[in-house]
Amino acid sequence: MSNRRSSEGDETWFRLLNWTKGQKAAERISAHILKSEQYHSVDPSHPLDGRDGGKDILCAKNSNKYVGAVYFPRGQKSLSEIKNKFMGDTDGVIKNDAKGLVFITNQELTLSQRHELENLVDFDVTVYHLERISSILDQPSNYGIRLEYLDLELTKEEQLAFFAQQEHKLNFYTEKLDLLAADYGEFKNYTLNMHEHDYDRSIDEILIELDDMIQKVWYNRHLNLKYKIEFQGEKVDPEIWKGALASAKKVEAKFGKENLGWDDFEWGMLNGKVSALRWVLGEDWDMLDT
């Protein structure tokens, strides 16, 4: 008999938070999550215990090397405990000459807490937190991984979603084969110009894009405040300003300073995109807080 599941899509979230399978399984499921997120050359170090050289996983993305750090305790821990584990893992970035850290954890972290972790260091940080990895594992393509590590069988609704996805893929490739058979020139032209994503975007893709845009909106507001401080005598708490300057450097390193300037039209488009994506995710229109 299959295990009884909680309602409202919480079961994956609940089983991750109440993790009982230890570090070995945590590192292995994290490797699957990274592969699902388009990381490549994913190389778990020593899931069966042993010296790992300051890394749980080595991986790569966009020709850059990253250190993967895995933290799957049982139950929710305090932010200070999460910070201590995070800071201990950052040593691996320097030891392995990596561009940044990918922190994969079964802990619930708010947006501000995630930004707090990211601002503790001056290199790239990507946080895969409880809500984010739950969403990844609840995608039809990852049902098998979820079953293996969380013992969660498919509901009737998920079975329908899985087969609908497969049917969509089959129809897509059937159409392309028909086009190839009918007109090779048109097929070649389509292939060269096809969009990178020919499918509905996942919630996780939307969240990643939204987070990037929020950082850009924040950066522009930071520049406005910087001008007021330098030329108009506005005062800000020194410690807060020190943190803001460090955050600005991280944004510049991530996007390139040359990509962080906008004319009035581009600035309006950026804010409009933030508002639209937040509305899609359940916020009110025109919610532009950063």
Image: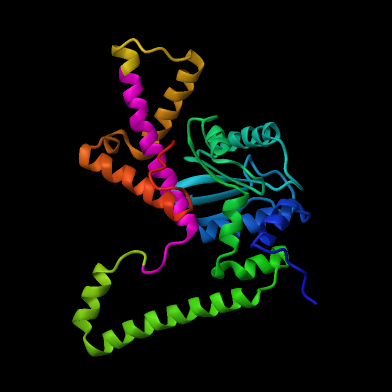
Q: Nearer the viewer, residue 270 or 136?
A: 270
Left or right placement of residue 123 versus residue 230 in this view: right
Left or right placement of residue 3 versus residue 166 in this view: right
Residue 26: in magenta span: no
Question: Which residue: 48% across, 13% down?
Answer: 238
Question: Which residue: 49% across, 58% down?
Answer: 203
Question: Which residue: 75% across, 53% down?
Answer: 19
Query: Which residue in the rendered view is the most extreme toward the right?
Result: 1
Magenta part, dominant SS: helix
Query: Which residue in the rendered view is the most extreme toward the top?
Result: 233
Residue 30, compared with residue 253, is above or below; it is below
- Magenta region, residue range: 198-227
Q: Quadrant of the N terminus?
A: bottom right
Residue 269, compared with residue 180, is above or below; it is above
Left or right placement of residue 205 versus residue 53 in this view: left
Residue 207: in magenta span: yes
Residue 47, compared with residue 184, is above or below; it is above
Query: Which residue in the rendered view is the most extreme toward the front?
Result: 284
The image quadrant of residue 108 is top right
Question: Which residue: 34% across, 48% down?
Answer: 273
Counting from the top left corner in percent of width and height, residue 133 is at 59, 55
Counting from the top left corner in percent of width and height, residue 66 is at 51, 45
Counting from the top left corner in percent of width and height, residue 249 is at 40, 28
Counting from the top left corner in percent of width and height, residue 23 is at 73, 51
Figure label count? 0
Type of colouring = rainbow
Q: Quadrant of the C terminus?
A: top left
Residue 114, compared with residue 184, is above or below; it is above
